[in-house]
Structure formats: C-alpha cells, structure tokens
Amino acid sequence: MTSPSLTLCADDYGLAPGIGRAIRALIEAGRLQATGCMTAGPFWPSEAALLRPLSRRAEFGVHLTLTDHSPLGTMPDLAPDGRFPPLGKLLKRAMLHRLDRAEIAAELERQVDSFEAAMGRAPDFLDGHHHVHQLPVVRDIVLDLAARRLAPGGWVRSCWDNPLAILGRGIDPARAGLIAALGIVLRRHLHRAGIAHNLRFRGVYDFSGRTPYSALFERFTDLPGPGTLVMCHPGEVDEPLRACETLTDQRKVEYAFLASDEMAASLTRRGLVLAPLPRA
C-alpha cells in the first residue's frame, strides 16, 4: 500500500540571504520539494548560484512579484516611484480591471528571464508573492507565461482548496477562504488549458505565532489527498530581511520546526511521506 504523500513548497527564495540558507539546508535534508524564487531583488543572482547545485533535489519556480518590492524594469502605471504597491491596493485595481496588462506582462516576462539567466534553464513552476498570480488581469498573463516559458512538465500553483476542508482545519478560515475563492477562476483555466497544477492547497495562517507551528503543521498535513501542496516560509532572520519585510521572526520558527526531529516524527507517526508534486 502506498503511503499518502504531500509536497512542501517554500516561498521567497532570493529575498534575503538568511532565507536562502534556511531553504537550501531544508532541501539538502529532504524536507522541501520545491521553492519559489523572487528573481527581481538584488540578492537573486548570488542566491541562484548557491541554489543551482541542488537542482536534482527539488523543483525551482518563479515567485512572481507585484507587491511591496521593486520591479526589474520601469512601470510608470503600477510602480511610478520604483516600488510595487501593497497588496490591498493591487487587489482593488485588479478586481476593477484597472491594471496595465502590457506593463505587467513585460515585468513578469523580465522576472522569468531573470530566473533563466541565473539558473540556465526554464522554471519548473510559477506562483505569486501574496498569490498575485491568480488575480484578474494577472492570471491571464500567467497562463500565457505557463504555456510558453515553463520547463517540460511544469506546473502552476493553484491556491484553491475545498471550503469544507478549510473550515474543518479551522486555521484562519476567513483568510484561507478568500485566497481560495480568488483562485477558482485560475484553477478552472488551468484545467481547461491542460496545465499541470496542485489539486489541494494548504499553509495559510496569520503568522502571529499564537498557535505553535507544530500544531499548525499537523493540521496542514493531516489526511492529504492527491496533489496536496503545503506552502511554508522558513528562514533565518538577518538585517537584509528586516530591511525589506515585516514577516521575520515567524520564519525562524517555521525553519526550526521543519528542520527538527519532531517534524520527521510527525510525518512518520501518521504514515505520511514527502514527495514531488504529482502532475494533474
């Protein structure tokens, strides 16, 4: 009998060196099967050079970025001051279809180009920082990128999950439900286009630290169905991270647990294994 499997994917590789150190260590330990790379930042080229030797140990994708940080090119409409807007502002403009499609398409193309230039190959998958890849206007661009720029067998992250499963887990159901609802249309288009994607998505919480991450992990990974992808944000906290992000200390908490014997024991006790994402 085959053990139930799930895939752990770490977000934000390349954002800061401390995040990179943590993610590489977890890949080497077999604790991560994928990581999404932020290719527009200043640390990406050097962090990519350190990641390349691990290409056979995990899948590497582009963590498409349109919030909070700086674009690779000029974007007079979305980032007139050289910095992307916060998520709330981007979300409002996307829902009203008040985004410059050509400008965003050019920037996301540059981010994929940056991945290929540093890694020497096409990305294994696409997803989005703050899940921006599933927003109106943006998702159409991502579908086009997926058709043209992914490596053979590549996939796109779907943030949809069954509402009953979200309620049953009881972890920040309002936030998880909103993210899932915003992902319904992208999931439908991925299916119609025959683009591989995960079938279930977990890992959403408020990063407050009020609930021990070990308890959250148990619920995120409990009873996985086929194609279950669990998002995580491990990292070491360094000055470059503190200078550019508000999510800091909880990354250290996640890293400590994911690297621990407790994490391995949690999976073993429930008969679960970690494996690359099956294609669907």
Image (tube, rainbow, N blue to C red):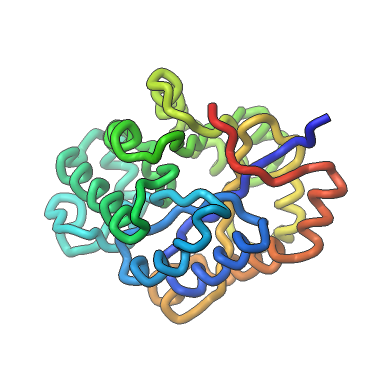
**Residue 180 appears at what percent x and percent y?**
51, 34
Question: What quarter of the picture does the C terminus occupy?
Answer: top right
Residue 16 appears left or right of 98: right
**Splitting the image into 4 quarters, where does residue 67 fall?**
bottom left
Work out whether residue 40 or residue 252 is closer to the camera in this orientation and state it: 40
Residue located farthest toward the top when viewing the structure as drawn: 192
Give me the residue at 55% from left, 65% from top: 24
Indicate whether 154 appears above or below 45. Answer: above
Indicate whether 186 appears above or below 209. Answer: above
Indicate whether 241 appears above or below 107. Answer: below
Residue located farthest toward the bottom when viewing the structure as drawn: 239
Work out whether residue 165 or residue 197 is closer to the camera in this orientation and state it: 197
Give me the residue at 50% from left, 32% from top: 197
Question: What quarter of the picture does the N terminus occupy?
Answer: top right
Indicate whether 234 appears above or below 56. Answer: below
Number of numbered discs visible in the structure rendering? 0
Give me the residue at 59% from left, 50% from top: 33
Residue located farthest toward the right when viewing the structure as drawn: 269
**Residue 243 appears at what percent x and percent y?**
40, 76
Residue 34 appears left or right of 47: right
**Residue 102 appears at what percent x and percent y?**
15, 40
Give me the residue at 70% from left, 65% from top: 259
